[in-house]
Amino acid sequence: MFDAVLIEKTEGGSRATLTQVGEDRLPPGDVTVRVAWSTLNYKDALAITGKGPVVRSFPMVPGIDFAGVVEASDHPAYSVGDKVVLNGWGVGEVHWGGLAGKARVKGDWLVPLQAPFTTREAMAIGTAGYTAMLCVMALERGGVTPESGEVLVTGAAGGVGSVAVALLAKLGYRVVAMTGRPEEAAYLTSLGAGAIMDRGEYAQPGKPLAKERWAGALDVAGGQVLANVLAAMTYRGTVAACGLAGGMGLPATVAPFILRGVTLAGVDSVMCPRPERLEAWRRLAADLDPRKLEALTADVALADVIPTAERLMAGQVRGRVVVPVN
Ligand code: NDP
């Protein structure tokens, strides 16, 4: 038996509890992992609180990420004792996830733990940090360089945003951090932000084209914020869009695309092909300052994950959360 967060269907929706489950209940898969560390992402908080339709089969162990040690393997690439990391692939949505003592998954979904990271550091990065890196790579593909001009990061005090600020600053970009939490200005500056911008500035509908300001932007908000970001891109700028923290809609016009040649690059981490995942982890090892990673990370016990998910949905969690499991 091992501890697990379990989401069960109820009449009105779903309910998450901390419980004990037996190994015989683990789903099919060719690799069984003793989970060392997991984490709490926005999507996990949506699943646990029932505020978003993340869970597609009940009962479900949430947790779209885990890092741990292989306990049993029928997969040629993995042997007992190997340290592995999992991000996405529908784990924690359709297949039992990482917020439990053990997980059983397809070996093809795993990646080896990237040196020099520990399992805890890999989860401090987690899907949020690996997505931040995928976004940085999308900006680079769009031709955005530190010489191009300022880069905006929205939702900067959140998980994706915090890692993005640290990464972009280390790469030499001048980063403007947009936040709804002005009290986090000193934190964002310590991660490398050159300036802080109040989220309220982009809360209302603006003009189809605004003054050109951003050479690049990394957006976790969507909605009105993304529409205003697009309108303020410089000629041929690129926006990497990965989130919907501010809404699913996009009340924008085509003006930035057809008059300024702006690129809107969509970023998905869940089904991202393996070579790009491995490249993102390699880049994280090279370009993320470990001291900044530590500064943006907080530990939360498995027993406290459910109330922390409520706080995350309320926008009260800063940076990344790691969960010691074993
Ligand atoms: P967090 O909850 O850690 O951070 C989200 C941040 O968004 C908040 O901290 C806040 O930043 C900002 N925010 C909250 N409400 C609003 C709002 N109404 N308008 C604008 N900004 C708002 O979540 P993550 O960083 O883990 O995830 C961020 C987004 O990215 C989520 O939508 C998530 O689903 C998505 N995501 C997508 C992935 C993909 O593969 N495409 C992978 C990972 C995440 P502040 O306090 O600074 O204002």
Image: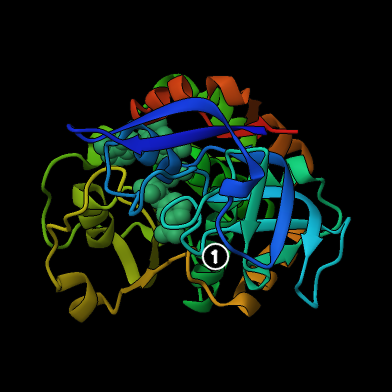
Dot 1 corresponds to which residue?
134
Q: Is residue 102 above or below residue 324?
A: below
- Judged left or right of residue 224, residue 124 is right
Label 1 near ligand 1 (CB < 8 Å): yes
Q: Does any portion of residue 276 appear in the rendered image?
A: yes
- Judged left or right of residue 116, residue 216 is left
Q: Is residue 48 above or below residue 275?
A: above
Q: Quadrant holding ligand 1? A: top left
Q: Nearer the viewer, residue 323 or 124?
A: 323
Q: Nearer the viewer, residue 236 or 162?
A: 162
Q: Residue 161: horizontal and vertical position, in percent?
A: 49, 44
Q: Nearer the viewer, residue 85 or 32?
A: 32
- Callout 1, which amino acid? Leu
The N terminus - image quarter: top right
Q: Is residue 280 above or below residue 177?
A: below
Q: Nearer the viewer, residue 93 or 260?
A: 93
- Judged left or right of residue 293, residue 239 is left
The kind of secondary structure element at disc 1 is helix
Badge 1: how crowded within 10 Å, few (<14), some, or many (20+)? many
Q: Residue 221: horizontal and vertical position, in percent?
A: 31, 47
- Who's the residue at 64% across and 50% down the image? 103
Q: Is residue 26 above or below residue 265?
A: above
- Who's the residue at 52% across and 78% down the image? 141
| Location of residue 310 by image quarter | top left
- Who's the residue at 12% across and 62% down the image? 208
The C terminus - image quarter: top right
- Judged left or right of residue 147, residue 68 is right
